[in-house]
Amino acid sequence: MEWESAYHAVVAVDIERSAGRGDPALLAIRSALRRVLRESFERCRIDWEACRVDDLGDGLRVTAPPGVRKAALVHPLFDEVAVRLRAHNRLTGPLTTVRVRMALHAGDVRLGPSGEVVGRPLEVLARLLDAPAVRTALAEAPPSTVAVLVLSEHFHEETVQHGRPGVEPETFRRVIVSNKEFTAPAWIRLAGCAAAEPTEPADPIAADSAAEDGPTPGPWRMTNRATGHGVVYAVQNGDQHITTTRRA
């Protein structure tokens, strides 16, 4: 078999802060990542055994089989990966918690007789995965955010812009990634956090207050309940609304 050139979608995933955990933890998180990816691909009906999987040390690069819908690698694949990582992290300790950066690109790559995969698309993929803007996006996200996805401009144009079901353009933001000699626009999306279960029924007074004042400026809302004659509602970067309850 000679070298063949063909158009493929390529995926790369890297574990955040994998160094310094020790060999047992590193082996555990590498195993967890491979399992998460394999289960996610199979859930998306992409044959894992037909993929070419390369070990990157702290992660994996996957060359998808010809004909795989690129949009499926955005959704449901990325969301499936995030769901499984959250499930893994709930049952593990700090040393084996996994958060990842995931990059997507596509183009003509050359396939070798012994399973080698080379070509410019792989170079672009590596630059996207390691770009400071992508690393920073995940580092600054809350701990419950388990993954960040970065798409090349080409991949975004052919998948996200069409607004297919499950692929929401408004959840992506455009950035300029610069890594070594590579500088190009790209698109970033953070994995949504799992919704917190309510601990008590919604307070109608708080709901009315929110409706009057508009959306909460920040991602958090704090409710302080006073034990005296009223209820104090504190909204981040906003006003405090005190409602006095008359006692009979």
Image (cartoon, rainbow, N blue to C red):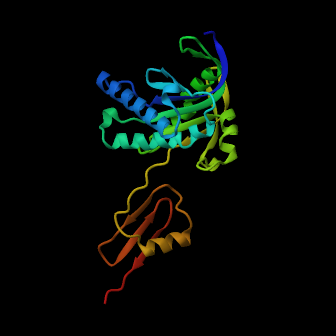
> What residue sits 33% from the left and 44% below the top?
90
244 w.r.t. 20: above or below: below
Q: Determine if residue 139 is in view.
A: no
| Residue 65, quarter of the rendered image | top right
On the picture, is 199 further left or further right than 49? Answer: left
> What residue sits 36% from the left and 36% below the top?
97
Q: Where is residue 243 in the image (x, y as percent from the top left)?
A: 42, 77
If the image is split into quadrants, where does the N terminus sit? Answer: top right
120 w.r.t. 16: above or below: above
Q: Where is residue 50 in the image (x, y as percent from the top left)?
A: 52, 26
Q: Where is residue 152 in the image (x, y as percent from the top left)?
A: 64, 33
224 w.r.t. 98: above or below: below
> What residue sits 64% from the left and 28% below the top?
106
On the picture, is 221 further left or further right than 62? Answer: left
Q: Determine if residue 133 is in view.
A: yes
Residue farthest to the top, as pictured: 2
| Residue 146, quarter of the rendered image | top left
> What residue sits 69% from the left and 38% below the top?
158
Residue farthest to the bottom, as pictured: 248
Q: Nearer the viewer, residue 123 or 60?
A: 60
If the image is split into quadrants, where does the C terminus sit? Answer: bottom left
Q: Where is residue 124 in the image (x, y as percent from the top left)?
A: 63, 24
Residue farthest to the front, as pictured: 1
Q: Nearer the viewer, residue 121 or 117?
A: 117
Count of picture labels:
0
Q: Which of 143 and 10 is in front in this view?
A: 10
